[in-house]
Image (tube, helix red, strand yellow):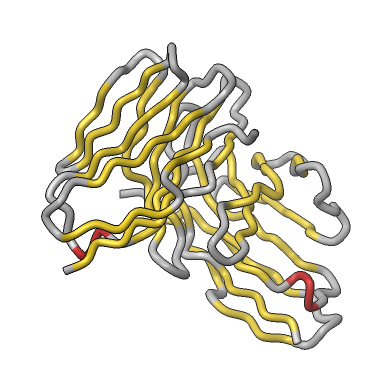
């Protein structure tokens, strides 16, 4: 089956640090990748949609300069949380989709803890 | 209210019983998908049902879609303790916009 690898799985760092999260589709080409944020016992909140080779589309209220997304290839997208602060602590999940009308395949998520 | 709402929010059943979760949405959709999430993990895709389909099966899972009522249901038959997880429905519209519901937390007691 389709496999998506997300790395790292857990990050603990000081306030002000920038953190990069990678999302890779291992056995398929992903035309679209999604980045979500999830708070405890809540649903996923879409942050941005990214298509290979083009700029990401951010959801309303998500700061582009704060959450930098790069989708350089059909198998890799990165999310960089710049100058992270405690309020950025959350569970971040990526997903990849080969084509429209196909399921999203999710990574295992990254738990980000900012001290 | 939000597209892709689910009920119940939480469901607790005994092993061997069936579990039914419902999802309602408001706009036209291309497809509806059900996912499972174990605590602290990513989501696992279960079933995708297209707007022109009415029912799909996968093992112990049965999904129905009623586009006239804008609703879907996920039935897990003969539940097991390992089915304990959160279950989310998600709708995709024709513009590739996805919306996830708030989820149903299922607890299957041994």
Q: Is residue B36 visible?
A: yes
B104 lies left or right of A66: left
Image coords of residue A78 (percent x, y): 66, 59
**What residue lies at 30% left-to-right and 58% top-to-bottom?**
B12
Quadrant position of the C terminus of chain A in the picture: bottom right
**What residue lies at 65% left-to-right and 47% top-to-bottom?**
A46
Image coords of residue B27 (percent x, y): 59, 20
A64 lies left or right of B48: right
B28 lies left or right of B37: right
- As displayed, is residue A65 above or below residue A101? below
Residue toward you, A5 or B23: B23
- As displayed, is residue B32 above or below residue A60? above
Residue toward you, B5 or A72: B5
- As displayed, is residue A8 above or below residue B74? below
Q: Is residue A27 visible?
A: no
A95 lies left or right of A39: left
Residue toward you, B50 or B12: B12
Image coords of residue B98 (percent x, y): 58, 35
**What residue lies at 43% left-to-right and 15% top-to-bottom?**
B67
Q: Quadrant of residue A68?
A: bottom right
**What residue lies at 44% left-to-right and 30% top-to-bottom?**
B32
Residue toward you, A29 or B97: B97
């Amino acid at each position: 089956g389709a496999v998506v690898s997300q790395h790292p799985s857990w990050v603990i760092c000081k306030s002000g640090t920038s953190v990069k999260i990678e999302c890779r589709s291992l056995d398929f080409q992903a035309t679209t990748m999604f980045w979500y944020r999830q708070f405890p016992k809540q649903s996923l909140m879409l942050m941005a949609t990214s298509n290979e080779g083009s700029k990401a589309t951010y959801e309303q209220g998500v700061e582009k300069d704060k959450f930098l997304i790069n989708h350089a290839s059909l198998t890799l997208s990165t999310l960089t949380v710049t100058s992270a602060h405690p309020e950025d602590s959350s569970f971040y999940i990526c997903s990849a989709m080969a084509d429209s009308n196909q399921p999203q395949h999710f990574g295992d998520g990254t738990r980000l803890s900012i001290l | 209210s939000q597209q892709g709402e689910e009920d119940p929010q939480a469901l607790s059943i005994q092993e061997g019983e069936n579990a039914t979760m419902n999802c309602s949405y408001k706009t036209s959709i291309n497809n509806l998908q059900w996912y499972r999430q174990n605590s602290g993990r990513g989501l696992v895709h279960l079933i995708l049902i297209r707007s022109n389909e009415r029912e799909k099966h996968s093992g112990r899972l049965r999904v129905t879609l009623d586009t006239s009522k804008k609703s879907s249901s996920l039935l897990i038959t003969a539940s097991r303790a390992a089915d304990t997880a959160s279950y989310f429905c998600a709708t995709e519209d024709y513009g590739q916009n996805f919306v996830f519901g708030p989820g149903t937390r299922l607890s299957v007691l041994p």
